[in-house]
Image (tube, rainbow, N blue to C red):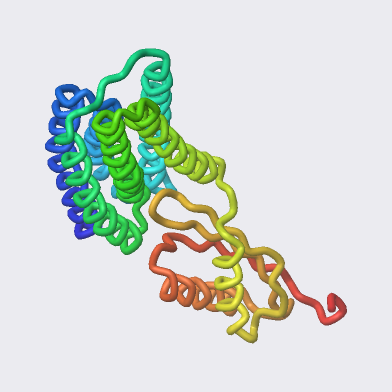
């Protein structure tokens, strides 16, 4: 738990520092270089800074053990953070789209080529940050770190789109092709769409977890396969599970021979729980309800 929290903080701090540098660079160069796309990308990076700071504040809460007031733990704190970041990105998408679309109704000037190089630098940096953050998120089942990784993912395509938009505008200016001058504006609208798409994915997943949607059927089948390894289990009546942030809570109903003692039922449930948790390190709790099984039930 301590290692997981330390890794999460490390990823968040790296994200904060890198995004602060990129935010300043893209906003300043985007403004100075007359590039809406790069400036919009900078606004997105500013949102990333805010998101990373929120993650740093909530990581300690999410990793706190269960207590009397929160018997299932505090894992959903990460989900709430993911939802906040999703809403923030949605607002950013609306703002960027508005600025980009309004630009089509005014005369435009070609942006400075320097803006393209800043966008390309951001593209390379974000690829590295996305891959490293997603790896840590998957290894530690962290929704908060996953949210940071998704932010980086949005920036990857956004940055290359901004670079292409600037390049098209520059080409349009030098070759006197008026339509290409709007390449930067079009790129900023595309950036808005990408940000909106990531926000939608994050909000959908966060709502599903908060509403305690059952986990994927493939994972449930893996749980069922483990349970079937125990011959004492005569019938599997129900298996369901829900994500609680970075861990999973499992609820199982099985039937065993009616003449089994409470001790035998308890030992079987303990063995099944151990087998499931050994195979799935993200399972925090397994609740098993035993039903009596009679031969005529076949």
Residue 253: give x, y in percent of width and height.
Answer: 65, 65
Front position in the image: 108 or 275: 108
Q: Is residue 105 visible?
A: yes
Which residue is outermost to the right?
296
Front position in the image: 13 or 223: 13
In this picture, is 139 found above or below 70?
A: below
- What residue is shown at x 38% (from left), y 40% (from top)? 82
- What residue is shown at x 34% (from left), y 14% (from top)? 107
Residue 52: give x, y in percent of width and height.
Answer: 24, 39
Front position in the image: 34 or 139: 34
Residue 243: give x, y in percent of width and height.
Answer: 48, 52
- What residue is shown at x 63% (from left), y 78% (from top)? 261
Which residue is outermost to the bottom?
231
For this view, does 212 lie left or right of residue 199?
Answer: right
In this picture, is 288 found above or below 244?
A: below
Which residue is outermost to the top?
106
- The image quarter containing residue 61 is top left
Residue 204: give x, y in percent of width and height.
Answer: 52, 41
Quarter occupied by the C terminus: bottom right
- The image quarter containing residue 215 is bottom right
Q: Is residue 61 visible?
A: no
């Amino acid at each position: 738990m301590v290692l997981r929290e330390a890794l999460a903080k490390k990823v968040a701090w790296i994200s904060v520092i890198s995004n602060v540098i990129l935010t300043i660079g893209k906003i300043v160069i985007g403004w100075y270089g007359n590039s809406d796309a790069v400036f919009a990308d900078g606004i997105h990076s500013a949102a990333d800074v805010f998101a990373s700071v929120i993650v740093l504040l909530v990581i300690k809460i999410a990793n706190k053990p269960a207590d009397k007031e929160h018997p299932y733990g505090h894992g959903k704190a990460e989900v709430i953070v993911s939802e906040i970041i999703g809403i923030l990105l949605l607002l950013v998408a609306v703002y960027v789209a508005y600025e980009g679309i309004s630009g089509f109704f005014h005369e435009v000037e070609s942006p400075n080529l320097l803006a393209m190089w800043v966008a390309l630098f951001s593209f390379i940096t974000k690829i590295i940050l996305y891959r490293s953050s997603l790896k840590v998120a998957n290894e530690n089942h962290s929704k908060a770190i996953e949210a940071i990784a998704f932010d980086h993912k949005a920036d990857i395509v956004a940055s290359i789109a901004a670079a292409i938009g600037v390049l098209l505008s520059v080409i349009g200016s030098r070759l006197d092709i008026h339509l290409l001058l709007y390449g930067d504006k079009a790129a900023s609208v595309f950036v808005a769409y990408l940000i909106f798409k990531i926000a939608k994915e994050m909000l959908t997943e966060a709502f599903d977890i908060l509403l305690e949607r059952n986990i994927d059927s493939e994972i449930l089948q893996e749980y069922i396969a483990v349970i079937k390894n125990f011959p004492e289990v005569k019938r599997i009546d129900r298996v369901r599970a829900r994500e609680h942030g970075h861990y999973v809570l499992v609820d199982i109903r099985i039937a065993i021979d009616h003449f089994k003692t409470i001790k035998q039922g308890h030992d079987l449930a303990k063995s099944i729980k151990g087998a499931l948790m050994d195979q799935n390190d993200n399972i925090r709790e397994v609740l098993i309800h035993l039903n009596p099984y009679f031969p005529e039930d076949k």
